[in-house]
Image: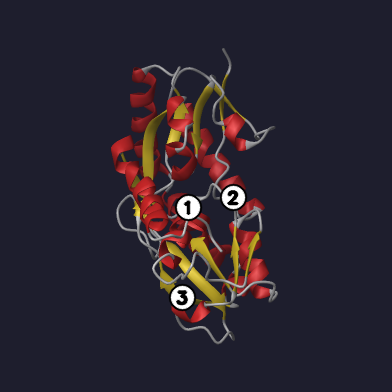
Amino acid sequence: MTWIAALPMYNVTPALAFEWREWLADVLLRVKPACRIVEPDEELHGFWRRPNLLISQTCGYPLMHGLHKQVQLIATPRYDAPGCEGADYSSVLVTRADAPFDTLAACRDARAAYNQDDSNSGMNVFRHAVAPLAQGGAFFSAVVRTGSHLGSLRAVAENRADVAAIDCVTFAFIADEMPELARQMRRIGLTAPSPGLPLIASNTVPSQTIEALRDALNDTLATQPERVKRLRLQGFSTLTLADYARIEQLEDEARAAGYPRLA
């Protein structure tokens, strides 16, 4: 079997994607068996389920909605980004810098943007934040799915939407890599925290290889400090599926409040 690896989640610019790929190559040099870094050639839900997947990164929402049956957790990165605490992260609620909204409550009848239906940071925690404010299952005048956090930020900047929830790690990378876009945003809140995006492997990967990957992840923190700083990595935590149940709890709380979807 030819093992494969990819890190598809925080590549907000080509330069940052290159840094992540170089870091992943460094990790893989320290483990056996040999593994090939690839660009996913199919929809990510299918890619994550490949039996020859040695390491990748997913979102906690799909993890808890079926993906956990085909994969195992390696580790959860800890990031140096506002809104992160340990292995937990939140989403930053943003509007345009010149918009009249100072709080999420003030965004009633505004236009919301979100990235994907299966995103914890762009949809699930956003829904949870809005749920106590919604009446009759509705809060916004319009909701648009953009396909990515970057797409949501651009929708807000271009006045096609008024508010969005952006993964705080993504937002920190946007501030680093695209400061002109970040300056067009104004933060108006922070969502509830939940466990960050985990590194995963196929269930076919032997347990000793998982341990070797964990050792390699930590080893790379010391070898290239400037790269680690640019990637905002602080370390890695070993979490369980029970820890990620927090994501389902946020979903259940929004549904119990009569707000099953962004609306």
Q: Nearer the viewer, mark 1 or mark 3?
A: 3
Q: Give the mark nearest the N terminus, 1 or 3.
A: 3
Mark 3 is on which residue type? Leu
Q: Is residue 238 visible from the viewing direction of this image?
A: no
Tell me: 151 left or right of 239. right
Checking the image for residue 49, the label placed there is none
- Of residue 90 and residue 39, the one placed in the foreground of this image is 90
| Residue found at x 33% / y 25% | 211
Q: Secondary structure at mark 2?
A: loop
- Asked if residue 128 shows in the view, the reply is yes
Please, what secondary structure does the residue beneath circle 3 have?
loop
Q: Which mark is residue 231?
A: 1
Q: Is residue 140 above or below residue 3?
A: below
Q: Are marks 1 and 2 in contact (CB under 8 Å)?
A: no
Q: Residues within 10 Å of mark 1 (few under 14, many from 20)?
A: some
Q: Position of residue 129 (x, y in %)?
A: 42, 65
- Outermost residue, top side: 1
Image coordinates of residue 78 in percent, x first then y, are 36, 50
- Residue at 37% x, 25% y is 210
Residue 27 % position (x, y): 46, 33
* Disc on res. 104: 3
Mark 2 highlights which residue? Answer: 11
